[in-house]
């Protein structure tokens, strides 16, 4: 008899902000979850348990002794579903560690930024079913093991029988989720939104405050339009993620503040604490994912015989910030002019 989700153990690899929030919601709803992550997260959970909160008032608390958190891959072979939540630069290392350790019938789901991680996992785990996934919401780690959902958004998972069971479980846990047969379009649609991650690093602002700066929005609009031009040449149709279709994102971003706040009210439903995951990476001394976001645009442009100069310029600025270990706190007008000059 085939297993149901009630009989399955869900493993979360790279249990940081997204992994702990998603895994914690699943566990709070009754799913069996095992977390694999770093010692500093394990230590905080041992001290205070796992605490989840949301901008809409939702909350859950899991006692320390109820959270099965491991700092190595011991017991990973017992997992039926593995949610991979590591940062993109760690995908190869994580896949190689999983190879030979996980069961061949385990289903692997990539819940990572970028468009290529599921393919990397599949190439290194040829005996396993690997599904692309996408998370369209922001989670911030506050004090200790307190993880806070700061925005609305959904999880998408590549359509598959196990994915359907997982999605049902996520929805029951209060995490909006759906399957998709067009994950390439979904991933590129999400990447359009992630183009703001590098801008958020350079701004040294919370996301909501940054989006209320029209010059920063105009800079993001420039990156979005350049990316859409590349996708058109490459024959890729990005899916609609959120309220606005891809073609309307840039025009909405360029609206005056008074009108933007009305038209894009849903875009501004962001907790004041929310920042991009890339900004958190800078603060925590981790590697940047810029090569997997804006870099994916530049790579696709090169393969398609065109260029993406604004995205290239942004990569250089973000790389410099990570090399120095701090945000430059650039004004929106200065950044916009830098990108416009690169694109001209």
Image (cartoon, rainbow, N blue to C red):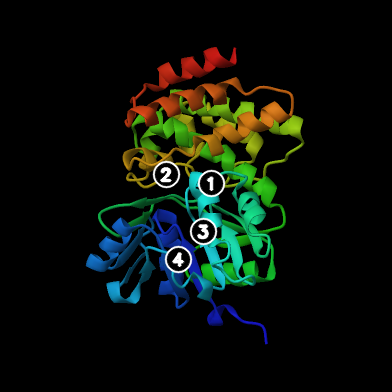
The residue at 33%/76% (across/down) is 66
Q: Hey, which quadrant is residue 70 in on the image?
A: bottom left
The residue at 28%/72% (across/down) is 64
- Crowding around mark 4 (Cα neighbors within 10 Å: few <14, some 14 to 19, many 20+) is some
Q: Return the disc, 1 or 3, that comes first in the chain's sequence.
A: 3
Disc 4 target residue: 73
Q: Return the disc, 1 or 2, that comes first in the chain's sequence.
A: 1
Nearest the viewer among 80 and 215 is 80
- Check the image and name the residue furthest to the front: 100
Could you tell me residue 19's position as x and y percent? 44, 59
Tag 1's secondary structure?
loop
283 left or right of 212 in image: left
Image marks 2 and 3: residues in contact by CB distance under 8 Å: no
The residue at 46%/70% (across/down) is 26
Disc 2 target residue: 277
Image marks 1 and 2: residues in contact by CB distance under 8 Å: yes
Disc 1 target residue: 113
Q: Return the disc, 3 or 4, that comes first in the chain's sequence.
A: 4
């Amino acid at each position: 008899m085939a297993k149901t989700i009630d009989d399955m153990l869900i493993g979360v690899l790279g249990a940081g902000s997204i992994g702990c929030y998603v895994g914690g919601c699943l566990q709070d709803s009754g799913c069996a979850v095992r977390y694999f992550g770093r010692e500093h997260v394990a230590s905080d959970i041992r001290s205070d348990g796992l605490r989840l909160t949301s901008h809409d008032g939702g909350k859950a608390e899991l006692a320390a002794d109820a959270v099965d958190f491991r700092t190595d891959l011991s017991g990973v072979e017992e997992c039926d579903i593995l949610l991979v939540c590591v940062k993109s630069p760690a995908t190869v290392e994580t896949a190689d560690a999983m190879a030979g350790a996980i069961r061949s019938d385990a289903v692997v789901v990539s819940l990572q930024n970028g468009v290529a991680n599921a393919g990397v996992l599949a190439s290194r785990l040829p005996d396993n079913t690997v599904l692309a996934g996408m998370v369209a919401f922001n989670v911030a780690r506050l004090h200790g093991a307190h993880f806070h959902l700061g925005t609305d958004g959904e999880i998408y998972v590549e359509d598959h029988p196990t994915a359907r069971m997982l999605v049902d479980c996520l929805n029951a846990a209060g995490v909006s989720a759906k399957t998709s047969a067009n994950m390439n379009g979904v991933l590129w649609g999400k990447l359009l939104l992630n183009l703001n991650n590098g801008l958020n690093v350079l701004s040294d602002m919370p996301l909501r405050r940054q989006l209320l700066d029209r010059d920063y929005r105009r800079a993001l609009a420039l990156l979005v339009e350049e990316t859409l031009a590349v996708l058109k040449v490459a024959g890729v149709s990005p899916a609609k993620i959120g309220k606005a279709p891809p073609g309307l994102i840039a025009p909405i971003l360029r609206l005056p503040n008074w009108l933007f706040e009305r038209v894009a009210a849903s875009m501004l439903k962001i907790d004041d604490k929310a920042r991009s995951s890339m900004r958190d990476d800078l603060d925590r001394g981790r590697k940047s994912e810029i090569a997997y976001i804006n870099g994916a645009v530049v790579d696709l442009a090169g393969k398609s015989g065109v260029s993406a100069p604004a995205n290239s310029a942004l990569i250089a600025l973000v790389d410099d910030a990570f090399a120095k270990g701090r945000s430059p706190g650039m004004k929106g007008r200065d950044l916009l002019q830098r990108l416009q000059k690169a694109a001209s």
